[in-house]
DNA sequence: TTACTTAGTGTAAAAAATACACACTATATT
DNA sequence: AATATAGTGTGTATTTTTTACACTAAGTAA
C-alpha cells in the first residue's frame, strides 16, 4: 500500500501476497485501487508500517483489516526498494506471503478507502498489476515453491481435516506440475507427520476418502531432520 | 549502522554480514563502535540507505567504504524491525550477506568515524554484538548454509583457481560438518560446472593439487536443473 | 634414501526415487 | 435391483542416488 506519502522522506511499507486455496484453485487477494497513482488498477494489499508495530505485527494487521482473519501463517520474503518503484516518492516495501484456507465464510470485510473492492483471483489468470507488484508476486510464488518442499506449509492452505488427494492437489498447484499418486502418498506418509483419522470425507458422490490431520507435535519432534519433499 | 537518527520518524538502514575465507577459517568483518549507544561494542557494519540508492546499491556502497572492494557477491536476506531493537528510536534494518575471498591485500581501508576499527574475526569465536546483531548474524549463517546447497556461492569465497580440497573445506566450514572426500569429489565433478586446469597448486611442501575453475557458462546452461549439493 | 604430507582414486551396499495399472467402494441413475 | 460413474487405495520392479570405506601415488624436505 503506497497511496499516501506523509513526507518527502522515505516511507516504509509492507505488501502482502495472500495465497488462498478453495479446494480447486490457488488464488491471491488483490484490491482495486481507488486513488492515484494507478487508480483502477489491481494491486497487492499493503500499508505503511506503524511506529510501534513490529514488521510481523504490521503484516498481520494488514491481513486482518482485509479479511477479518487472525492467526494466519505469514512470512516476510523480500524487500523491494528501487528509488523509482513508486512514482511519487521513495517507498521501500517489505513483501510478505500468507497462506489461507478459503471456503470459510467470514473472509473479506469492509475495505479501507483507498480500495474500491478486493477479490480473490486465480493465479492462472492475473490482471496487470500496479507498481512493481508483478515482480513482488513472482518472487512470492517462487518462494513458496521452494518452501513447500522443505517446510510443512501446504497444510496452511487446507482445512484441519483433509484428504491425501487434496494435499497432493495443493502441491501440484504450487509446484505447477503433476505428481504420481502412489509415490506421493508413500512419501508423505513416510514422513510420519500425518495422523490418519477414523473419519471419512462427506458430501461427495463417490467413494469417500479418509481424512488426515497434520500432527504438529510429531513434526516438532522430527524437526532437525528437515522434510524434503 | 544505526548511530544517528535524523528524525523521530523511522529510519531505514542496511546491515551487512561480510563472510570472508582466508583458506583456513571463515570470518566475518566487525567494527568496533566509537559512539553511543553500544560504544566500544562490536557490531555489524551498516549504514542508512540514501535517498537515491537502490537497496543493493546501498549494500555495495557500505561494503566498498569498508573494504575498498567492488563487484562482490551480496544478497539481502531478512528485514529486522522490532520497534525496540534500537534504544534511541525506530530503525528498520535490512540484512545482507556478502562472500569475500580474503588474502588479497587491498581489503580494509580507512573507516568512517563511528567506528574505531574493523576486524575480521573467526566465526568460531565471536564477541558479544551490539543491538540485535547476534540475531542478524545467526540468520545470515543459516541462510548461506541453505544456499550453499543449491547455488554455486562457495566459489565466491575462493580464488579463481582453487583445488577440490579447498572447495570441500569451504563446504565443511559453512555447513559445520565433515564431508567424505571421495563422495564430495564425485558429486561436485558430476555437476559438470568445474573446469579442470592444466595448472597445479604452487608453494606447497607436498604433492601439489590440480587447480580448477568454476565455469559460469556451463553453469548457466545447466541452470533450471538446480544444483543440489 | 627416507620420512612426511596431502592428492587422488573405485566399489559394494543401502536408500531413495521413479514408473506404472487395476480392483474397490460409495453414490447416483435407470 | 442392476448398472454407470468417479475417485480411492494399493505393490513391485527398476533405476538412481547416497553412503561407507582404505590404500597407493606424487611431490617436498630432511
Image (spheres, coloured by chain):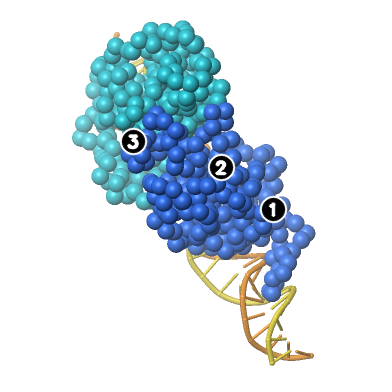
Chain colours: A blue, B cyan, C yellow, D orange
Q: Nearer the viewer, mark 2 or mark 1?
A: 2
Q: Which residue is mark 2?
A: A62
Q: Position of residue B27 (x, y in %)?
A: 41, 20
**Is residue A165 rendered to the left or right of residue A177?**
right
Name the residue rendered at 38%, 11% in the picture: B114
Q: Position of residue A90 (x, y in %)?
A: 37, 34
Please say if the residues under marks 2 and 1 sit with CB atoms less than 8 Å apart.
Answer: no
Task: Name the one closer to the observer, C19 or A125.
Answer: A125
Name the residue rendered at 40%, 14% in the picture: B31
**Is residue D20 rendered to the left or right of residue B73?**
right
Q: Position of residue A5 (x, y in %)?
A: 43, 36
Pick whichever of labels 2 and 3 is earlier in the sequence.
2
Q: CA distance from mark 2 to mark 3?
A: 24 Å
Q: Which residue is mark 1?
A: A160
Name the residue rendered at 22%, 36% in the picture: B197
Name the residue rendered at 42%, 41% in the picture: B150
Task: Name the one closer to the observer, B108 or C17.
Answer: B108
Task: Name the one closer to the observer, B193 or A59.
Answer: A59
Q: Which residue is mark 3?
A: A83
* Mark 1 neighbour density, 10 Å: few (under 14) some (14–19) many (20 or more): few
Q: Position of residue B142 (x, y in %)?
A: 49, 31
Pick whichever of labels 3 and 1 is earlier in the sequence.
3
Amino acid at each position: 500500500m503506497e497511496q499516501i506519502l506523509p513526507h518527502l522522506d522515505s516511507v516504509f511499507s509492507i505488501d502482502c501476497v495472500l495465497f488462498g486455496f478453495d479446494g480447486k484453485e490457488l488464488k491471491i487477494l488483490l484490491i482495486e485501487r481507488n486513488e492515484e497513482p494507478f487508480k483502477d488498477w489491481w494491486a497487492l494489499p499493503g500499508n505503511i508500517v506503524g511506529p510501534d508495530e513490529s514488521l510481523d505485527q504490521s503484516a498481520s494487521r494488514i491481513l486482518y483489516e482485509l479479511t477479518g482473519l487472525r492467526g494466519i501463517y505469514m512470512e516476510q520474503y523480500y524487500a523491494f526498494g528501487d528509488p523509482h518503484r513508486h512514482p511519487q516518492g521513495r517507498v521501500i516495501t517489505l513483501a510478505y506471503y500468507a497462506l489461507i484456507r478459503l471456503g470459510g465464510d467470514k473472509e473479506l470485510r469492509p475495505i479501507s478507502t483507498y480500495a474500491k473492492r478486493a477479490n480473490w483471483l486465480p493465479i492462472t489468470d492475473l490482471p496487470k498489476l500496479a507498481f512493481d507488484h508483478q515482480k513482488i508476486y513472482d518472487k512470492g510464488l517462487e518462494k513458496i515453491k521452494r518452501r513447500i518442499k522443505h517446510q510443512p506449509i501446504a497444510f496452511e492452505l487446507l482445512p484441519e481435516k483433509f484428504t491425501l488427494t487434496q494435499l497432493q492437489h495443493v502441491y501440484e498447484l504450487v509446484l505447477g506440475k503433476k505428481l504420481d499418486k502412489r509415490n506421493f502418498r508413500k512419501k508423505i506418509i513416510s514422513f510420519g507427520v500425518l495422523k490418519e483419522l477414523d473419519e471419512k470425507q462427506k458430501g461427495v458422490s463417490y467413494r469417500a476418502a479418509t481424512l488426515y490431520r497434520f500432527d504438529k507435535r510429531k513434526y516438532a519432534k522430527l524437526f532437525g531432520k528437515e522434510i524434503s519433499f
